[in-house]
Amino acid sequence: MWRNIAVIGVGQTKHGIQRDVNAAEMIAEAAWKAMQDAELAPEDIDAIAIGNMQGFGGICQAELWSGDLFGAPGKPVLRVATGGTTGGSVAQCGMYQVASGLFDTVLAIGFEKHSDSKEPGATMGLAHVGLANMFHLLQSGVDVRTSFAYGGGVGAAAGVSGYQAGEYMHRSGCRIEHLDMVAAKSRRNAAKNKYAHLQWPNCTAESLAKHPKFGEVVAYPLRLGHVCPASDGASAIIVASEERARKTDRPAWVRGLASCADEENQQAENAQGVSVMDSSEQIQCRIAAMKAYRMAGIKNPRKEIDVVEIYQPFPHQELMYSERLLIFDDGKAWIPLEEGETEIDGKTPIDPSGGVLSTNAIGSSAMQRVAEAALQIMGKADEHQVPKDVRNAVAHGWGGSTNFTVVTVLGDTPRLRW
């Protein structure tokens, strides 16, 4: 049986290149900030959920040697890794643990420290992913040479997303200028977020496109200014039972959550569209969103969702996933973008935090989407707080090999019954 639960505390580190701290210190900072925000002490925490993409960072099992710094010894710890969705999966893990009645209060932490790996660790981390893809291809009997040209061996995430961006532009009719607009909005919003990495106050689509460095096309249609950074950082939330949540001022209630994997989409990435010809289709996101909205009692997302936090390391993904999340009509997200609807002060603000485009510590990134959605409902987002009453917010993450999606709906009131 599911019981009502809420996010009652949020903690984040400053994201960027953090050479002055190690991974354990970074994790502990986020954990302590979340506990302080919730006005709890370590002894009030029943269990811990934590995750990062270990292969990308090149640092093994930081959760095992960081726990002493924030009161974890003796408590149950569950580690999660699902690619880019890791932070969102960790958050949902904590939510399920409390909703089930297994625990009353869970600390959920996502983190990544890319700068520790530098070139050797980053290369080996990507090699782990590439080797997994290669064995998948060998098992299915697909020509490895052409598959490496598609993504695993050339361009990594940017290479895959370049193809996806082209496919999305073909189906939607949006132009590279719309990608410039999304990227510029992300940098402007990040300048209002003290925890964000890439901050560019007053950035415009024109200034980005004409910039001698960031305007350069690296994998058409993506410019360098369209690509997310490799950040260090950690973020954390505290999930609590209804009894504990009602003792706080303004909790962010968990109203719905879902995840979905589309293995045919994975074959589209690795095998040149053997199963899915268009890697921008992302049907698993639509399915997860429908499940989460149904659980949350959301009947019209376009009207009922006040803030959207999308996992968008590349700008076309903000447009694409806003459609898959049923916020905008298929192929039409560039129209409300042009009309300013997705700005912080717009009708449907998308990524007021600056999103993954401006901050990408991979294990933390999808956790930040949940944390930022919670902050908007709590009214604690400081300078990037949207100027309206936020009743419902949706947080999104994608990962795996672009084939896995998590969706979480938060609200200012709990569900009346389940």
Image (tube, grey):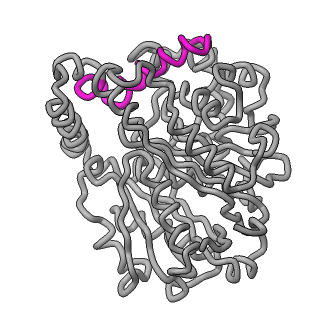
- What is the span of residues highlighted in magenta in the rendered image? 151-175
**Main secondary structure along the magenta-highlighted residues:** helix
Q: For the C terminus, which image quadrant?
A: bottom right
Q: Nearer the viewer, residue 94 or 159?
A: 94
Q: Is residue 147 magenta?
A: no
Q: Is residue 159 magenta?
A: yes
Q: Residue at coordinates 57% horizontally, 75% vertically from top-left?
A: 35
**Residue 38: x %, y % from top left:** 64, 75
Q: Is residue 20 visible?
A: no
Q: For the N terminus, which image quadrant?
A: bottom right
Q: Is residue 164 left or right of residue 381?
A: left
Above or below 296: residue 181 = above
Q: Residue at coordinates 60% horizontally, 57% vertically from top-left?
A: 371
Quarter assignment of residue 285: top right
Quarter assignment of residue 245: bottom right
Q: Nearer the viewer, residue 239 or 96?
A: 96
